Amino acid sequence: MDETIDIAFVFDDKFSDLFKVAIYSITKNTKSNLAVHIVDCGISEGNKDLIQKFTSEFKNISSIEFKIPERVEVFENYTIPVHFSAAIFYRLAIPKVFSELDRVIYLDCDTIAVGDISELWNEDLNGRPFGAIEEDGNFFNAKTKWRRMKEINFPENKHYYNSGVLLIDTHKFEDNKIFERVIGFVKNTDLQLSCPEQDAMNLCLADDEHMTLSPKYNFIPFAFSSAECLKKIKEPIIMHYAGRKPWEMNKKVIGLAALCSMKKYHMSMMLKYWEYADYVDKKKFSNGNIFHTLKFLYKCLFQPIEQFISRKCCLAKNLFLDN
């Protein structure tokens, strides 16, 4: 356990409890020492104390530090979808805020580790500033993905990646001025970016500026290709709850649905989150919202039909274009 893995999170008070679930899952599945670096985008002193106390329970967390980033006006004033905050942009400031680091793993707070993240830590970036995983998570069928890409004028020959898990070479990231380039793009674009920092990164950076990593490091259970993806990777390392949030669901209802074998694959992914969330606060994470729960169950029943039709339509469209 001599190796120390540097992990960074970026959040405000709203995500403090989700951070605890994420970090607890990492400590349970990773043997290496962990140094935790938090970009503080509005965390109260009370919550910092609670986080310090919580992380002190785990022997493999060797240190934890909070640093406040220099605020960027264009990010603070940008019109952001209601479920985000300006904090999403400051993942790109990690190499500036923690300039003493050589390499760091960035994780969104809606992730859990279900395997040892040292595998990700030891990935070869082949001289590139960062590694990322191709995105399917915000697209629940091929049609919505195609529509989203069209909305942001995304080139067909480029790979669109998810920014929820990044392996960053801090020095190369700075040398390539990635933070500054994203600032410039956001300031000057007229596009409506529904995933602002992620869309901006994909649009203004070249394909060869990132290393494409295995989806096992950013496995999104409710993406339209997730079942096929799971067959290839066998065991995920990091699970990312993009789109469907377990803490919005009622655990008991989901558990009963799992017993009835209604789309058991998706149910098991939800229940996996509560294995870690219950340790943090069983009551807070288990009650959920009945509306979100019923919506999720509806999706689990009818989404396979929707996906089948979507794939057939996509195939038909490609055949038509080829002819």
Image: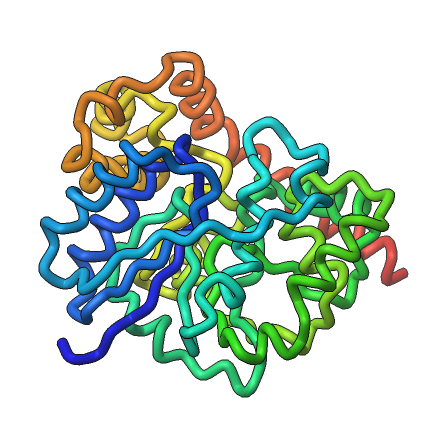
**Residue at 54% from the left image edge and 72% from the top image edge:** 130
**In the foreground, 100 or 255:** 100
**In the foreground, 53 or 120:** 53
Q: Is residue 110 left or right of residue 45?
A: right
Count of numbered circles in the view? 0
In percent of width and height, residue 224 lies at 54, 45
In percent of width and height, residue 68 lies at 46, 50
Q: Is residue 113 left or right of residue 67?
A: left
Q: Is residue 47 left or right of residue 229?
A: left
**Residue at 35% from the left image edge and 58% from the top image edge:** 37
Q: Is residue 83 left or right of residue 183?
A: left
Q: Residue furthest right?
A: 323
**Residue at 24% from the left image edge and 56% from the top image edge:** 26
**Residue at 43% from the left image edge and 78% from the top image edge:** 102
Residue 298 appears in the picture as rendered: yes
Q: Quadrant of residue 276?
A: top left
In percent of width and height, residue 204 lies at 76, 62
Q: Quadrant of the N terminus?
A: bottom left
In percent of width and height, residue 66 lies at 36, 52
Q: Quadrant of residue 157?
A: bottom right
